[in-house]
Image (spheres, grey):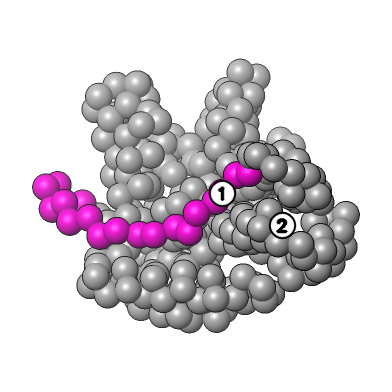
């Protein structure tokens, strides 16, 4: 099954490369991988660290830089060829990646950055079982504080820890936990907008809308879903980061499930998060392929 998955991903990557000069059609790309658009984009992001949109953007700018340095094609024509509707937008994006203007890319000996095509390799470890359970859970309400983060240039990996630090420092996370109906506190990723490269991150606890309203907190409904639940044991954040990595690198490719597109949960339980035996969980909404 993993080899089959690898071949499907390769088909999707081949299609992306073939269409670098065309508008990005995520539905067609996901179809090449026999996957839903959401599942493909989430898998791609978790495995590579970049979104599909960011990957395509950087590949286009790599190809554009190569063409500018090796040909006399007008900058405007290269911009249009790789999907930019104005020389200004092309120049801005080009400078962000390469640190120079498109016209400067033609200077002899200039340094250009290359974003190579991504390849996936099959890794058969089998040295450690990945235990999980499938849980059916009815819709429930969570209360807490949220921010909107972007996945561009890995900004979410900086903003989310900063958000936790802020809420821990001012006592908000403790207040959320105290107002909740259980001792657990949740980190929730939701409202994924892959095309815009952003999502909402919520630090929350299960609770009621009335409690949220009277305490100045956000209230969100997590819809009923089938969840794949994975346990992390060990000090934070390394242990749970490893679990996330294994879910997308090992579990999904070998399972009969795919991401259903709903919110993702991290469930933090009471205890010393630095301890070797600290337990927390990752909840992923899934559906049968």
Numbered circle sitting on residue 114: 1
Q: Is residue 278 visible?
A: yes
Q: Nearer the viewer, mark 2 or mark 1?
A: 2
Badge 1 density bin: few <14, some 14–19, many ≥20, Cα 10 Å: some
Residue 95: x percent and y percent? 75, 44
Snapshot quadrant of residue 52: bottom right
Q: Residue at x 37, y 47 (%)?
A: 244
- Left or right of residue 235, residue 60 in this image: right
**Vertical placement of 15 versus 171: above or below?**
below
Residue 182: x percent and y percent? 45, 39
Q: Residue at x 39, y 59 (%)?
A: 119
Residue 235: x percent and y percent? 32, 26
Residue interval drawn in magenta:
112-130
Residue carrying label 2: 68
Snapshot quadrant of residue 28: bottom right
Pick the front one: 127 or 226 = 127
Badge 2 density bin: few <14, some 14–19, many ≥20, Cα 10 Å: some
Q: Is residue 83 visible?
A: no
Q: Earlier in the sequence, mark 2 or mark 1?
A: 2
Residue 3: x percent and y percent? 24, 70
Pick the front one: 266 or 63 = 63
Q: Residue at x 71, y 57 (%)?
A: 68
Farthest residue, direction top: 169
Residue 55: within the magenta? no
Q: Residue at x 35, y 21 (%)?
A: 274
């Amino acid at each position: 099954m993993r080899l089959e998955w690898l071949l499907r991903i390769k088909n999707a990557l081949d299609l992306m490369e073939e269409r670098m000069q065309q508008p990005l059609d995520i539905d067609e790309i996901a179809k090449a991988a026999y996957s839903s658009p959401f599942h493909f984009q989430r898998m791609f992001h978790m495995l590579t660290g970049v979104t599909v949109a960011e990957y395509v953007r950087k590949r286009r700018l790599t190809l554009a830089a190569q063409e500018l340095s090796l040909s006399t094609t007008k900058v405007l024509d290269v911009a249009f060829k790789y999907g930019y509707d104005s020389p200004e937008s092309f120049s801005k994006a080009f400078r962000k990646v390469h640190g120079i203007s498109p016209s400067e890319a033609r200077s002899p000996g200039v340094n250009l950055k290359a974003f190579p095509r991504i390849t996936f390799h099959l890794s058969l470890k089998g040295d450690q079982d990945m235990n999980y359970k499938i849980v059916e859970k009815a819709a429930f309400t969570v209360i807490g504080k949220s921010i909107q983060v972007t996945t561009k240039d890995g900004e979410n990996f900086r903003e989310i820890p900063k958000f936790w630090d802020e809420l821990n420092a001012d006592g908000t996370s403790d207040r959320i936990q105290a107002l909740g109906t259980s001792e657990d506190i949740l980190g929730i990723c939701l409202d994924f907008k892959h095309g815009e490269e952003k999502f909402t991150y919520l630090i929350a606890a299960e609770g009621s809308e009335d409690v949220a309203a009277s305490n100045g907190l956000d209230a969100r409904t997590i819809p009923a879903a089938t969840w794949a639940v994975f346990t992390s044991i060990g000090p934070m954040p390394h242990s749970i980061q490893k679990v996330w990595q294994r879910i997308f690198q090992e579990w999904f490719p070998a399972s009969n499930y795919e991401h259903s597109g709903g919110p993702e949960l991290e469930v933090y339980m009471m205890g010393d998060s630095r301890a070797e035996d600290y337990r927390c969980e990752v909840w992923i909404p899934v559906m049968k392929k």
